[in-house]
Image (cartoon, grey):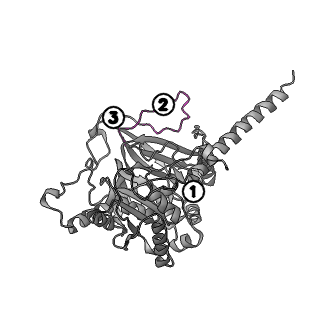
């Protein structure tokens, strides 16, 4: 019996399934970005909302006043007579301004800038319970993309002033064993300085921050998207700011090509209260796994927090170790399980063994995630991508690595600690529309 027809039918079926998954994934992303809700009122349905405070990064605009005029006109259309404006500075990219806006009675604070500005404003807003809005005006706008916030400033303002919102987690990141410090100020220090400058009372004086406390340490950076060390850190450090202005996010791709030669790192990875791994009898899964050890068996050096019996430690070799709060990048799904509201950080280890061939393998695995295909890490794979979700994590490399937070390089260091502040923010988002609502009328 000729098996050719059956083989052709199976191949056609597999192809159809692949195309269907690709269409589903891409249309889902398109639908999320088109899901705009037009607010019926500028007031929160549960409480009256006073005039908004907008914290703007003026360096993102050729004409900052024109941008302000545009937003002011749109605000008036939505029933807002006056908008309070604050501008970021090189010394304070938004954290202190957010703290002061809260002290002045703001019931919504809107960050108008790129991911760096959004991160800085979020650091000042964390734990306040006050609504935060986003007007994406940057190169990547990764967080806004993950939250389906539109790129158009007027539409983004409408979303910010509408009633739809969701909790968003915030990660706090700090580095140790620093060999080359960063000029970028830590948001924890900016937040502390702003609180002290606003004359907090004795009853409000902060307790000394620890790794398990909500209030950040003065050496902690806020992270809303992705932090990491190794290849991704080198990519961010090598990205030309002027090139970003001219060609946008493609500048990151260009820098990434140049950073492919970054050496593999040997490191200890600590996963704090990780989600249990699924059974993997074939040993080809995309899960990071380690073994539970006690404190005495942990790598030498200071501990970020007391270990529990649920913590795991493993030795890894990788080109990059990343910690993702948001899973989607431009045209790429980096962490398919990432959820901005689940209280977990997604740890990702990426390795390429054989130069360009290994990076090609990693690229195909990443592209496969765009259509819902999980990476398969065979023993003969030239590139591997592995994940694990945990409530916190630390990585210590044998050699100093370039570190980054949300696209900003934060120096050269051997150790990075990450902890989560679950539900730290209340962010305005568009309402998701159903397929019926999106159909042409």
Secondary element under disc 1, as helix, strand or loop, is loop
Left/right placement of residue 253 relative to residue 222 reads right
232 shown above or below 374: below
Q: Is residue 276 magenta?
A: yes
Residue 83 is left or right of residue 192, and the answer is right
Question: Nearer the N terminus, badge 3 or badge 2?
Answer: 2
The location of residue 343, given as percent across then percent down, is 38, 43
The residue lying toward the viewer, choosing from 404 and 373, is: 373
- The answer to which of 138 and 324 lies nearer the viewer is 138
Dot 3: few (<14), some (14–19), or many (≥20) neighbours within 10 Å? some
For the N terminus, the image quarter is top right
At mark 3, the secondary structure is loop
Magenta-colored segment: predominant secondary structure:
loop
Crowd rating for badge 1 (residues with CA inside 10 Å; few <14, some 14–19, many 20+): few
What SS does tag 2 mark? loop
Residue 405 visible in the snapshot: no
In percent of width and height, residue 75 lies at 45, 67
Q: Earlier in the sequence, mark 2 or mark 1?
A: 2
Q: Which residue is mark 2?
A: 278
User: In this figure, which residue is indicated by the disc labeled 3?
Assistant: 310
Q: Are marks 1 and 3 in contact (CB under 8 Å)?
A: no
CA separation, marks 2 and 1? 29 Å
- Numbered disc in front, either 2 or 1: 1
Query: Disc 3 versus disc 2: distance between alpha carbons?
Result: 16 Å
When the figure is inspected, residue 340 is found, relative to residue 257, above or below; the finding is above
Q: Residue at x 13, y 56 (%)?
A: 203
Highlighted magenta segment, given as a residue range:
271-289
């Amino acid at each position: 019996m000729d098996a050719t027809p059956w083989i052709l039918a199976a191949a056609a079926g597999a192809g159809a399934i692949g195309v269907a998954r690709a269409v589903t994934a891409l249309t889902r992303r398109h639908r999320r970005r088109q899901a705009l809700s037009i607010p019926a009122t500028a007031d929160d349905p549960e409480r009256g909302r006073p005039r908004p405070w907008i914290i703007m990064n003026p360096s993102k605009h050729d004409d900052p006043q024109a941008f302000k005029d545009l937003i002011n006109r749109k605000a008036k259309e939505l029933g807002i007579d006056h908008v309070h404006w604050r501008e970021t500075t090189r010394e304070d990219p938004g954290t202190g301004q957010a703290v002061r806006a809260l002290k002045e009675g703001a019931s919504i604070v809107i960050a108008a800038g790129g991911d760096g500005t959004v991160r800085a404003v979020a650091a000042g807003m964390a734990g306040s319970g006050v609504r935060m809005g986003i007007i994406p005006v940057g190169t990547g706008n990764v967080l806004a993309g993950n939250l389906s916030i539109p790129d158009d400033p007027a539409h983004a303002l409408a979303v910010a002033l509408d009633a739809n919102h969701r909790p968003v987690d915030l990660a706090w990141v700090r580095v140790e064993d620093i060999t080359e410090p960063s000029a970028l100020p830590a948001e924890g220090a900016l937040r502390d300085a702003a609180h002290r400058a606003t004359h907090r009372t004795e009853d409000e004086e902060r307790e000394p921050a620890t790794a398990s406390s909500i209030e950040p340490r003065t050496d902690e950076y806020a992270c809303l998207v992705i932090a990491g060390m190794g290849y991704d850190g080198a990519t961010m450090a090598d990205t030309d700011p002027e090139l970003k202005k001219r060609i946008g996010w493609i500048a990151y791709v260009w820098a990434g090509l140049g950073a492919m030669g970054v050496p593999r790192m040997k490191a200890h990875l600590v996963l704090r209260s990780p989600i249990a791994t699924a059974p993997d009898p074939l040993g080809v899964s995309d899960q990071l796994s380690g073994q539970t050890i006690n404190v005495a068996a942990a790598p030498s050096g200071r501990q970020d927090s007391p270990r529990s019996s649920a913590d795991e430690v493993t030795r890894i070799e990788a080109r990059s170790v990343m910690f993702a709060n948001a899973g989607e990048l431009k045209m790429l799904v980096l962490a398919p399980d990432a959820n901005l509201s689940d209280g977990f950080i997604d740890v990702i280890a990426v390795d390429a063994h054989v130069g360009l061939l290994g990076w090609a393998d990693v690229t195909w695995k990443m592209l496969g995630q765009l259509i819902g295909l999980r990476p398969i890490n065979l023993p003969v794979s030239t590139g591997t991508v592995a994940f694990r979700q945990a409530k916190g994590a630390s990585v210590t490399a044998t050699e100093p690595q370039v570190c980054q937070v949300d696209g900003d390089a934060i120096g050269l260091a051997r150790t990075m600690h990450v902890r989560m502040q679950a539900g730290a923010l209340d962010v305005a988002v568009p309402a998701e529309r159903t397929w019926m609502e999106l159909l042409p009328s």
